[in-house]
Amino acid sequence: MRILVAGSSGLIGTASVAWLRAHEHEVRRLVRRPPAAPDEWFWDPPTGRVDPAALDRVDAVVNLCGSRMDERRWSGAVKQELRDSRIVPTDVLATAAASAGVPTLVNAGAVGVYGNTGEDVVDERSPAGRGFVADLCRDWEAATAPARAAGVRTIVLRIGIVLSPHGGILRRLHPLFRLGLGSRLGDGRQYMSWVALEDVVAALGFVLGRGDIAGPVDVTGPAPVTNARFTEALAHSVHRPAPWTTPGFVVGAVVGEMAHALVLTGQRALPAVLESAGFEFRYPTIGAALAHALGT
């Protein structure tokens, strides 16, 4: 396949480009600066510009754009940036894919669309939740409407907490746990829908090759765990104790509104579409995923 990828420099994007090329697909990368390599093509989401040649004879567009949600405290400006970095590129690429007659659009999303689910199990058939993150994710998915209206097969990957030593949550937690400073957050009962980075990119390749899959697809490990269980598993992986608990009010004082949206609440999401389609996770348990990610 010839695949056009936006967001190719991020954690998932970098791994996805490598995986696609290893499986003999041709990858074109959209960049927001003057192209400096034969596989780069210019685009400018704020102005809606996409080099038309980038879409020539393309089989699929993959959009992985979106700034990290956990890097800074959420001011009004930061929250607007979080929305703009997702919704604007999605609308631009969905419109471009529709105009060019691209057969398939795969767009990133997040399990945050379900809101705080407590102990309830959710999957792709479940409704969206409430709150800033759920509203953002719902609007993010809705921005694919131009492609869907034009008959483009549109897939939204609702991605969970990605486990990789190269970025994401483990890049922050691993050093703390190695020092014996790991702790449960709040009461530890909030669920974490985690997924190994290798399974994310394999799932992307899987849905690209399955013409019968469309709509939302949960990209999470098949066995979500509570924060307490995650803490226990991570401590075991680095051979350190983690007997501590960080009270919720302390977490809130440190990171603000983000604490209640991303840290002290969570989702117990299952990958129903992937599993029913026969996708096999390489790392189906939190222990296996952490052992691989940390090389233990």
Image (cartoon, grey):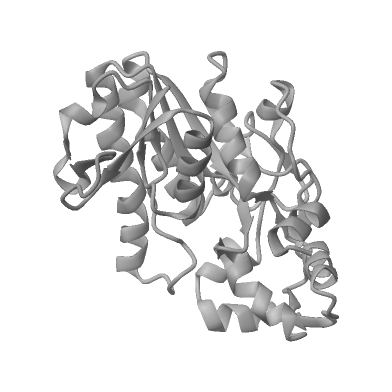
State the quadrant of the N terminus.
Answer: top left
Residue 220 visible in the snapshot: yes
Horizontally, residue 144 falls left or right of residue 252, namely left
Horizontally, residue 114 falls left or right of residue 88, namely right
- Res 158 quadrant in image: top right
Residue 135 visible in the snapshot: no
Which residue is pictured at 28% across the width and 20% down the height?
98
Name the one closer to the observer, 272 or 267: 272
Horizontally, residue 296 falls left or right of residue 50, namely right
Above or below, 96 against 184 in this view is above
Above or below, 102 against 52 in this view is above
State the quadrant of the C terminus.
Answer: bottom right
Name the one closer to the observer, 91 or 278: 278
> Residue 278, percent across and down?
73, 23
Which residue is pictured at 60% across the width and 65% down the height?
169
Which residue is pictured at 78% across the width and 68% down the height?
234
What is the count of numbered marks? 0
Which residue is pictured at 32% across the width and 52% down the height?
85
> Residue 287, percent across and down?
82, 56
> Residue 204, percent across and down?
54, 34
Horizontally, residue 218 falls left or right of residue 238, namely left
